[in-house]
Image (cartoon, helix red, strand yellow):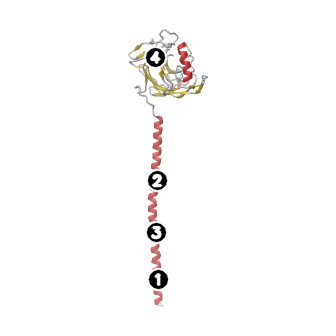
Amino acid sequence: MTRKIIVIAQCLTLLFLTANFSLAADTKKETSAKKKETPKKEACTKCAKKKETAKKDACTKCAKKEEAKPDLCPKVPKDGIVLLDDKKCEFVLMDGSEPIDWPLEKGILTSSGGKRRHHSNHIVSKYHFRDAKIHVEFLLPKETAGNSGIYIHGGYEMQILASNDVKDADLKQTHCGALYGFGEPLTNALLARDKWQTYDIWYTAPRWDKEGKVTTPGKVTAYLNGKLVQKDTEINDPRSGYRPWKYKTTDWLGKIHKNWKATSVAPVFLQDHGNPVKFRNVWLQPLDKEGFYYKEK
């Protein structure tokens, strides 16, 4: 009897030890599995953070690229067309004749009424274009209103005026930086009167149909002294009653006007408004292949 009890006790002990060993093995496996899972979770968290950071960085870079200014270098690009520098002056009078009667000295033109009256002695570029970047530098007179302008295609005037003291909240379409008849300046970007000022203008011409109606509006983006003053301002039919096509115009301009309505190609004008505004370093960069030097047929 005693022997049987001993055998039973030994069996129970063996079963107990086996069960404990199995439980310890399972626990070890679970611990090992948890250890393996933890790095994965941590790695995933780190990857997710890296991806999110990368996305944010990419978005920031994109935003910076979109906000970046275009090329405002005053140097003439390789494909640029020089209209005025110290070697040439590619302008004619309102009737197509030359030389022009604006004073010209060392590459600097001074706006003048010449023989024509009523502020109509504008000068006209020999080169005609459709879409282009236009660069013009000007100097306001020490006195007078300094009124002048850049008549793009004879219909859209980037205003020049000594409006230095006007606050941004009070800017109107008559002040410097305005696209006359279409949009007031976004900011007053004028420098002092004794400083040369710079316009950089990106111009997309309106498109017309055979009946002379605008089918696709044009756009103007302009910088004055490196500051944005017009942003994608939409243009259609000209609105100024004093534009060269209409006010004190000539038969020669009448022919060019017809071609403009048919092709959206025309010259740029520098305006005479009775004030001795000076101009230098005038050039344009065609944005298509439609430009040419005008010769009357």
Residue 183 location in percent, x, y?
Answer: 54, 25
Residue type at tag 4: Phe
Q: Marks 2 and 1, Cα distance to the nearest angstrom?
A: 51 Å
Nearer the observer: mark 4 or 2; the answer is: 4
Nearer the observer: mark 3 or 4; the answer is: 4
Q: Marks 3 and 2, Cα distance to the nearest angstrom?
A: 27 Å
The residue shown at (56%, 22%) is 262
Of the pair 216 and 247, the residue shown nearer to us: 216
**Helix, strand or loop under label 4:** strand
The residue shown at (47%, 44%) is 56
Badge 3: few (under 14), some or many (20 or more) residues near its Cα, within 10 Å? few
Question: Which residue occupies the extreme bottom position in the image?
Answer: 1
Earlier-in-chain disc, 3 versus 1: 1
Q: Which residue is mark 1?
A: 11
Q: Marks 3 and 1, Cα distance to the nearest angstrom?
A: 24 Å
Q: Is residue 96 above or below residue 131?
A: above
Q: Marks 4 and 2, Cα distance to the nearest angstrom?
A: 67 Å
**Helix, strand or loop under label 2:** helix
Q: Which residue is mark 3?
A: 27
Earlier-in-chain disc, 3 versus 4: 3
The residue shown at (54%, 20%) is 259
Earlier-in-chain disc, 4 versus 1: 1
Of the pair 84 and 161, the residue shown nearer to us: 84
Q: Which residue is mark 2?
A: 45
Report whether residue 218 is seen. yes
